[in-house]
Every structure is written in C-alpha cells, then in structure tokens.
Image (spheres, rainbow, N blue to C red):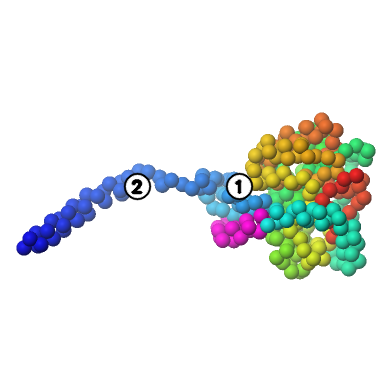
C-alpha cells in the first residue's frame, strides 16, 4: 500500500510536469531567435571560412551558398574541407615550386616546347595587351601586381580606379566559370590595358586531373574569358600553384608563379598585406594577391600609390616578360629579376 501511494505521487508529479513545464520552453522558443552561426549573417557576400584562396563561396540574399553569384547550390562540406587541405598543401609547396622554376625554367620550357609542338597554338599572339601610348622605361624598376580568383567587380574596380590614377596596370588571373557574371568588369580590364590571365575554368587542382581534363580546364577558361571580354588569355596561373609533369605537359601556355606571396587570403588583414609587398618588393617581382577580399582592395589602395612614389612601374606580367627575356609555352616563371 505504501508503495502504491508512492507510485501515485510520482505519477502526479509527472502529470504536473507535463501540464506546466512545456508551456515555458515553447513560448520562449517562439520569442527568441536561436543563435545563428557567423556565416548565417552573411548575405550577398563572400565567405570562405579560411579555406584558402579559390574556395570562397558566395552567399545570396536568401543565404544559399554557391561558388559564384547567381548559381546558388549547397556545396558539400566534406568537399570543401578536402579542398582546404589541398590548398594548404599547395601553399606550403610554393617555396619548392618557386625554386624549381628559378633553377630550371628555361631547360624545362625548351623540353616542353619540343615535346609539345602544336597542340594548342591559339593562346599566343593575339592576346598581347593593346599598347596605346603606353610608356614603359626598361631601365626603371617594374613590378607585376597579380590578382587571382576573380573577377569580382567590387574589389576589381577599386583596384583599377587606383591603377588608373597612377598609370599602373595589373594582371587578373580569373576563374572562367565566373567570367559571364562579370562581363562589364572584364571589358573594363581590356579597355584600360590590364591583362586577363587564365586561372582555369573552375579552380580545380590540376595535379588531380588527367591530360585531357587539364586541357579542358584551360581551354574552357580561355573560351569563357574570350566570350565575355573579346580577349583570350595568354598566361596561366595554376590553382594553388600545384603542378606536376602531367600539368606541365598539358598546359601549353607560360605558367606564372610569384615571388611575393602576400597571404592576403589567409590574414585578411590590410596592413599585413601592404607590408608583405612594401617590405620585400624589388625590381622584377611578381606579387600574388586575391581579388575576392575587401581587405585586399583596401591594401591595393595603399600599395599602388606607395609603389608609384618609390619609382616602380606597375606593369602586366606580359609587359614585364617582354622586357625581361620573354616567356614560352609551358615555361614556369616566378619573377623577372634583372
Ligand atoms: Zn586561386
């Protein structure tokens, strides 16, 4: 009997809990918004969650995430994570890539030129920048500012505004899949004498692809840029800087690396990006930056006037190559020092 009474009191307690407690949490849940993850605050902007260059994702006004504006499609997190690791591997391999190109570029280039005679001749001469009254003094120092992963008009136009003010030109290595969305920006690049380079069609790591796939990545980017701007890129920058024998054998255009890595995509810090350039720059350098980030745009607005004041001519990669020994298909170039 005692146990029966205990059971009754327990059941009554449970009944009370069921009757009253739920009212509280349900009403409070209705009133409060659950704390949102940081990226849920982004609308009409880029997020990349520090995944490295080339893997930024666009968030539209509804919070849909995609590779570029207008193509909302959720992308799998595992894929992104994989890319992060690969990009980091690519970044850390830059040093060796640079020294490789510095020590062996001409021999490598000749080998490639012999073994790959006429597979893809279309990328060469018609792509030289239009030279209308452009004065470059080969005796004076020059530097090539390069911006990868665009086009992205909000930053690209800022960079071009500043370059116009100081008579400078830059090279924009663009991702082909983004070209159609930024025709106006690409046409401005051409009209103002900047160079558009090829950064593959959708920023795939070419070391993971076979020869036909590599050629497709390059050719589709060239076609997309040509369709959007009327100009076909002459130069290629490899996503992550990643290359191997198959890549070198199938990219039938000069491959442009860099001698100053600002790590702008990683720091997202304007003054660090500015210092990375100004504390190291010398005649013949190729500077790596990324067009997607507002901090990079802000950095460019500081870098460009200071380079001009220091006597640097800001030239495109093709312009610099023209005065410093030239380039050949499949050659790898990280600088054009004297
Ligand atoms: Zn990239």
In the image, residue 274 sits, relative to residue 104, either above or below, namely above
Look at the image and tell me whether residue 153 can be seen: no
> Mark 2 and mark 1: span between their CA atoms?
30 Å
Q: Which mark is residue 46?
A: 1
Residue 308 sits inside the magenta stretch: no
Q: Is residue 314 left or right of residue 63?
A: right
Seen at 85% across and 64% down, the residue is 120
In the image, residue 194 sits, relative to residue 304, either above or below, namely below
**Percent coordinates x, y for residue 23 in the rendering:** 26, 48
**Percent coordinates x, y for residue 215 in the rendering:** 77, 65
**Percent coordinates x, y for residue 280 in the rendering:** 78, 40
Dot 2 beta carbon under 8 Å from ligand 1? no
Query: What kind of element bears circle 1?
Result: strand
Q: Which residues are magenta?
A: 71-88
Residue 76 sits inside the magenta stretch: yes
Query: What kind of element bears circle 2?
Result: helix
Q: Quadrant location of residue 110? A: bottom right
Q: Quadrant location of residue 220? A: bottom right
Q: Which residue is mark 2?
A: 29
Q: Is residue 130 left or right of residue 149?
A: right
Quarter of the figure that contains the N terminus: bottom left
Seen at 64% across and 43% down, the residue is 267
Residue farthest top in this picture: 309
Q: Residues within 10 Å of mark 2 (few under 14, many from 20)?
A: few
Seen at 49% across and 48% down, the residue is 37
Q: Quadrant location of residue 200? A: bottom right
Q: Which of the two discs, 2 and 1, labels the residue nearer the N terminus?
A: 2
């Amino acid at each position: 009997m005692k146990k029966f009474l205990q059971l009754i009191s327990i059941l009554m307690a449970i009944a009370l809990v069921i009757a009253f407690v739920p009212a509280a949490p349900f009403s409070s849940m209705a009133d409060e918004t659950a704390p949102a993850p940081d990226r849920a605050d982004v609308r009409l902007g880029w997020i990349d969650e520090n995944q490295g260059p080339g893997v930024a994702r666009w968030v539209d006004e509804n919070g849909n995430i995609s590779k570029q504006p207008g193509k909302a499609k959720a992308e799998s997190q595992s894929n992104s994570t994989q890319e992060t690791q690969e990009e980091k591997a690519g970044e850390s391999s830059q040093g060796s890539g640079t020294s490789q190109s510095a020590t062996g570029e001409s021999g490598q280039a000749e080998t490639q030129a012999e073994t790959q005679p006429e597979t893809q001749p279309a990328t060469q001469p018609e792509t030289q920048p239009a030279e209308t009254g452009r004065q470059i003094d080969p005796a004076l120092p020059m530097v090539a500012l390069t911006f990868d992963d665009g086009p992205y008009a909000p930053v690209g136009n800022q960079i071009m505004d500043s370059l116009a003010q100081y008579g400078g030109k830059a090279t924009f290595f663009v991702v082909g899949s983004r070209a159609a969305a930024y025709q106006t920006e690409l046409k401005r690049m051409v009209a103002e004498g900047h160079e558009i380079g090829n950064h593959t069609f959708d920023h795939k790591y070419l070391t993971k692809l076979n020869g036909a796939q590599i050629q497709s990545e390059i050719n589709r980017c060239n076609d997309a840029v040509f369709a959007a701007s009327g100009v076909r890129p002459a130069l290629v920058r490899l996503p992550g800087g990643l290359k191997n024998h198959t890549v070198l054998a199938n990219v039938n255009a000069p491959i442009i690396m860099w001698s100053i890595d600002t790590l702008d995509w990683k720091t997202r810090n304007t003054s660090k990006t500015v210092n990375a350039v100004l504390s190291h720059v010398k005649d013949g350098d190729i500077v790596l930056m990324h067009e997607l980030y507002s901090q990079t745009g802000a950095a460019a607005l500081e870098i460009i006037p200071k380079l001009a004041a220091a006597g640097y001519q800001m030239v495109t990669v093709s312009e610099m190559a023209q005065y410093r020994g030239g380039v050949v298909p499949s050659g790898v170039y990280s600088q054009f020092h004297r």
